[in-house]
Amino acid sequence: MIYSWKKIVKNSIPILTIAVFIEIFAGQILQGNQEKLLLFPIFLISIPVINGVGGNIGSILGARLASGLHVGYIELTIKDKNIQKNFLTSLLMGLITYAILGILIYYIAYFGNIQMEIDLLVFVSIVLGTGVLLILMISIISVLTAFLAFKKGLDPDDMVAPVVTTFGDTLGIVLLFLLIGVVGIW
C-alpha cells in the first residue's frame, strides 16, 4: 500500500471534525462539574491519567488490529482468536495499570498535601472501576472502528487513533463521574 498524504487528509478530516465536537462536549461536562471537582481535587488530578491510559491502551489495540488486518493474520470476524487475545490483553493491562495508578495518585496527592476526604480503598475502587469500564468500552470501539474502516476501504491506522482518543476522553469523564455518584461522594 502506498501512502498519500492527500488521501490521509481527505479521509481524516470528517472524523477529526466530529472528534472536535465530541471533545467540546467532554469539556462542557467538566465545566459543569467544576465546583464539585474543586472540592475533591484528587479527582481533578485523576482525569488526565485515566483518559491518557485509556486512549493509549485503546490505540495500541487499534494499531495491532490494523496491522493484523493489513498483513492478513487477523480476519474480519469477532471469532478470530488473535482479536480475542488482543482484546483480553488490553483488559488485563488496564486492570493492572489502573490499580497501580489509583494507589500512586492517592499517595502523590497525600504527600503533596492535596485536600482529600476519601480513603485509599474507595479512591482506588473508583479509579479501577472507571479504568476497567473505560478499557472495555474503548476496546470494543477500537475493534469496531478498525473493522468498519477496513471494510470501507479506509486505512484503520488513520481512523482508530482519533476515534479511540476522542471517545476515551469523553467516556473517561462520564464514567468517573458516574462511579463517583454511585459511591455517593457527590
Image (tube, helix red, strand yellow):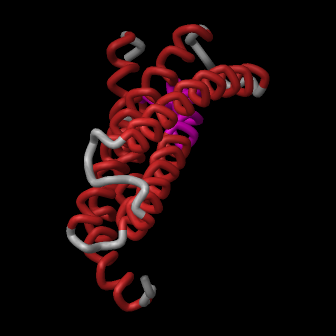
Residue at 35 percent across and 45 percent down: it is 170
**Main secondary structure found in the magenta portion:** helix
Residue 99 falls in which quadrant of the image?
Answer: top right
- Relative to 30, 63 lies left or right: right
In the image, residue 1 sits, relative to residue 146, either above or below, namely: below
Residue at 33 percent across and 64 percent down: it is 20
Region in magenta: 36-50
Quadrant showing the C terminus: top left
The answer to whether residue 134 shows anywhere in this view is: yes
Q: Position of residue 150 (x, y in %)?
A: 29, 65
Residue at 37 percent across and 91 percent down: it is 6
Residue 45 falls within the magenta-colored stretch: yes
In the image, residue 99 sits, relative to residue 67, either above or below, namely: above
In the image, residue 152 sits, relative to residue 28, either above or below, namely: below
Residue 39 falls within the magenta-colored stretch: yes
Quadrant showing the N terminus: bottom left
Nearest the viewer among 44 and 11 is 11
Q: Position of residue 119 (x, y in %)?
A: 59, 8
Residue at 33 percent across and 14 percent down: it is 182
Q: Position of residue 12 (x, y in %)?
A: 33, 75
Q: Residue furthest left?
A: 152
Nearest the viewer among 38 and 112 is 112
Residue 35 falls in which quadrant of the image?
Answer: top left
Nearest the viewer among 70 and 48 is 70
